[in-house]
Image (cartoon, rainbow, N blue to C red):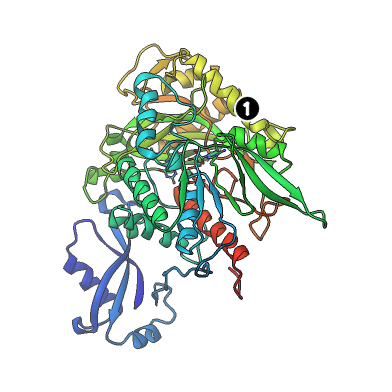
């Protein structure tokens, strides 16, 4: 097969046009092209009056060697890469060695557990939250009734933080082994739409994620894996061998049980603040790392569609438009858009009582009225929260508490119209934009719950972004806060062998450990870590 990339055609082209473009591009006759399939489809909307669909295609040709030779200098004509996944090792028949434990059933833990199960290691998955159906009810409990369950919410429970999300499935990670393809293939097997394998910016939406997560659980259980829901890892037991090397020995669980464990994937996500404390207490290496804080911004989706797609706004093939923005400010900070959710809603994303956190989600259709995204400012331990390794957590908590208070101490989010935000005055009534956050938005002044340098940086960036996306800085646009859970405030550092830097047998992974940001990268990291752990149990020559 030959992979032909960068084939651009008008938005309204026919399937026959695609074939004709291939023949023209490769100077072939129709009988030379035996089969054509789409490997990837994106769009180029730089010229709004002439938006193009851009394809990467896999072609079966009568004489592929001749075409490859003729186009040897052309980077867009290459042999199709082999993206199939191969297990790095396999548990032998009747394997009676240690069972790996996976802490956390988010995308990272889920893929780690799946791959371990597929290799025959029968993992035990320990998840503090509930199974996803029950968890869904609890999550809606906060949104509809202002009742938070600190162990079952947007952050905690089967499926992890990405379950109630837009389900965006792209990432900028280096992926020479095509592990992202393995993740997407497993998602499709579990019920995700096929187009995630070909769309340049695939997404799933919340409802499908819920059923996929259940289907993956069924697969893991059929392969001998075992889930323990409603069970939190509270403490880590370590031992030191004669050579002075620290090893993980077992886990103290919230039900009082001690689970001996020598091989553990730690995939707890960025909100497991109590678990971070337990790791530090057990002497496991943890360090503070940069993250970002700010607000959510909401616009009518139609404004973004028009700004991005001009006369093609609303075109079904293009779907709801997204944006990605960044601005380097005069105070040295960078303001950027984060986790943009077209046609979605802003969600209450706290996991702790008396705190308010915003995030965003959408359904597969992306058909809701508003577009939203985080608008956040980078912060670092050296500059903003020096000293204690958990100082970033303290800062998050402080801001989330201020937001709770500013919102009226009832889980409503504090909000402000953009025009008032720029003028530094509290808002009193909504204008053209009605926010989507449930249980509601209380209009106030967001300066009450964010540091001055963050407010200053966002004020500088808004008009800049308004020049890039017309309407972005309309005075009626609504900002809500606070956005604090952008990534983990700590790194649970691991070595090149994927073990914790100072505790063998503990494999920190995913977003909480500081090795991923987003569903796809967390899932890919889960596979990498599972492979390293499996090879430690059953080594083969050659390694990962
Ligand atoms: P998590 O998904 O956070 O999973 C960690 C799991 O560990 C949780 O289930 C938790 O309950 C469990 N756990 C924690 N501590 C313990 C313990 N001590 N014992 C037992 N279990 C424990 N990313 C995207 O790529 N696209 C999006 O569209 C997107 N939208 C998002 C929308 C929202 C509302 C949120 C909150 C996040 C969104 N993200 C999105 C980010 C994405 O969800 C995360 O990057 C991803 O889920 C991280 O995966 P993870 O497995 O590393 O951690």
Q: Reply above or below: 146 against 115.
A: above
Residue 148 locus on image (x, y percent): 44, 23
Residue 429 horizontal side relative to residue 527, left or right: left
* Residue 440 appears in view: no
Quarter placement of the N terminus:
bottom left
Q: Residue at x 62, y 50 (%)?
A: 261
Q: Residue at x 52, y 25 (%)?
A: 352
Residue 41 locus on image (x, y percent): 31, 60
The residue closer to the viewer here, 495 or 275, is 275
Residue 186 locus on image (x, y percent): 38, 58
Q: Residue at x 36, y 54 (%)?
A: 187
Which residue was labeled with disc 1? 395
Q: Reply above or below: 262 against 88.
A: above
Splitting the image into 4 quarters, where does residue 160 fall? Answer: top left
Q: Circle 1 — which element?
A: helix
Quarter placement of the C terminus:
bottom right
Give neighbour class at mark 1: few <14, some 14-19, many 20+ (Cα, 10 Å): some
Residue 28 horizontal side relative to residue 252, left or right: left
């Amino acid at each position: 097969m030959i992979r032909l990339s960068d084939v651009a055609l008008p938005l309204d082209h026919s399937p026959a046009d695609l074939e004709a473009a291939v023949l023209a591009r490769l100077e072939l006759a129709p009988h030379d092209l035996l089969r054509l399939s789409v490997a990837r489809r994106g769009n180029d909307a730089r010229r709004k009056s002439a938006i193009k669909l851009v394809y990467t295609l896999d072609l079966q040709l009568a004489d592929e060697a001749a075409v490859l030779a003729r186009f040897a200098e052309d980077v867009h004509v290459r042999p199709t890469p082999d993206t199939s996944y191969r297990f790095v090792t396999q548990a032998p028949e009747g394997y009676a060695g240690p069972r790996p434990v996976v802490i956390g059933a988010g995308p990272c833990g889920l893929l780690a557990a799946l791959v371990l199960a597929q290799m025959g290691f029968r993992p035990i998955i320990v998840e503090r939250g509930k199974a996803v159906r029950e968890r869904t009810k609890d999550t809606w409990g906060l949104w509809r009734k202002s009742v938070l369950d600190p162990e079952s919410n947007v952050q905690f429970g089967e499926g992890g933080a990405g379950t109630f999300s837009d389900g965006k499935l792209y990432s900028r990670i280096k992926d020479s082994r095509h592990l992202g393809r393995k993740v997407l293939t497993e998602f499709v097997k579990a019920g995700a739409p096929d187009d995630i394998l070909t769309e340049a910016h695939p997404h799933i939406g919340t409802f499908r994620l819920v059923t996929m997560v259940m289907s993956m659980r069924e697969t893991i259980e059929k392969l001998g894996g075992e889930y323990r829901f409603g069970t939190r890892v509270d403490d880590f037991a370590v031992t030191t061998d004669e050579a002075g090397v620290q090893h993980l020995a077992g886990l103290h669980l919230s039900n009082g049980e001690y689970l001996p464990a020598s091989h553990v994937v730690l995939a707890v996500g960025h909100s497991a603040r109590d678990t971070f404390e337990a790791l530090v207490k057990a002497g496991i290496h943890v360090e503070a790392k940069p993250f970002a804080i700010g607000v959510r911004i909401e616009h009518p989706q139609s404004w973004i569609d028009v700004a991005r797609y001009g006369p093609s706004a609303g075109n079904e093939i293009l779907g709801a438009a997204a944006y990605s923005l960044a601005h380097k400010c005069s105070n040295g900070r960078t303001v950027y858009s984060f986790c943009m959710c077209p046609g979605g809603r802003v969600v209450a994303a706290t996991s702790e009582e008396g705190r308010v956190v915003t995030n965003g989600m959408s359904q597969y259709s992306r058909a809701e009225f508003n577009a939203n995204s985080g608008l956040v400012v980078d912060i670092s331990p050296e500059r903003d929260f020096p000293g204690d390794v958990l100082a970033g957590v303290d800062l998050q908590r402080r801001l989330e508490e201020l937001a709770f208070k500013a919102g009226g101490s009832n889980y409503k989010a504090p909000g402000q119209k953009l025009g008032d935000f720029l003028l530094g005055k509290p808002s009193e009534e909504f204008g053209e934009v009605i926010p989507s956050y449930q249980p509601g938005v209380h209009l106030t002044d967001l300066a009450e719950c964010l540091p001055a340098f963050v407010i200053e940086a966002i004020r500088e960036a808004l008009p800049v972004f308004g020049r890039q996306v017309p309407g972005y800085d309309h005075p009626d646009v609504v900002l809500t806060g606070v956005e604090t859970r952008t990534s983990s405030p700590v790194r649970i550092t691991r070595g090149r062998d994927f073990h914790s830097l100072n505790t063998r047998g503990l494999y920190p992974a995913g977003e909480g450990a500081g090795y991923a940001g987003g569903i796809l990268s967390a899932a890919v990291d889960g596979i990498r870590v599972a492979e390293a752990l499996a090879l430690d149990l059953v080594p083969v020559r050659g390694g990962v």
